[in-house]
Image (tube, rainbow, N blue to C red):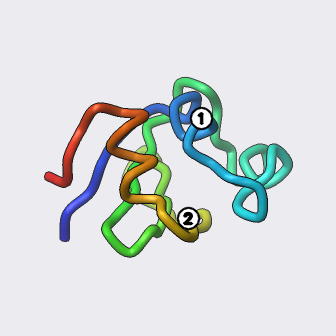
Amino acid sequence: MKFIEMTGATLLNVINDGELHDADFESAGVQPDSIVRVNQQGDIEVRRALKWDVIGGLLGNFQERLKKTTGLDWA
């Protein structure tokens, strides 16, 4: 599976209305400096000490938003 990794702060710049909200990030324990990743299906995962946890998903044209915001491609 391929992902684009970023910080929680960068992810906030990718999110559109109707996707995750600030309260969702807070309840998932995502901070601006948290490491998060998104797979090609739009699933958002946050890095924990021993594993990755799925915390939500992106909708719509997220691939272009991710690439434009992060400057990264799927790896």
Height in image: 48 above or below 58?
Answer: above
Question: For residue 58, which numbered disc appears in the image?
Answer: 2
Q: Please name the residue shown 60% across and 63% down the image.
A: 55
Q: Amino acid at mark 2?
A: Leu
Residue 47 in view (yes/no): no
Name the image quarter holding the N terminus: bottom left
In the picture, measured across the screen, residue 42 lies left or right of residue 9, that is left
Q: Which mark is residue 13?
A: 1
> Which element is circle 2 on?
loop
Secondary structure, mark 1, is helix
Q: Give the percent coordinates (x, y) of residue 21.
A: 79, 51
Q: Is residue 46 left or right of residue 15?
A: left
- 1 or 2: tag closer to the N-terminus: 1
Q: Which class describes the residues within 10 Å of circle 2: few (<14), some (14-19), or many (20+)?
A: many
Determine the residue positioned at 37% across, 58% down: 63
Q: Position of residue 69 (x, y in %)?
A: 43, 34
Relative height, residue 57 to residue 31 (above, below): below
- Relative to the observer, which residue lies in front, 30 or 60? 60
Q: Name the outermost residue toward the bottom.
A: 41
Comparing 23 with 27, the one in front is 23
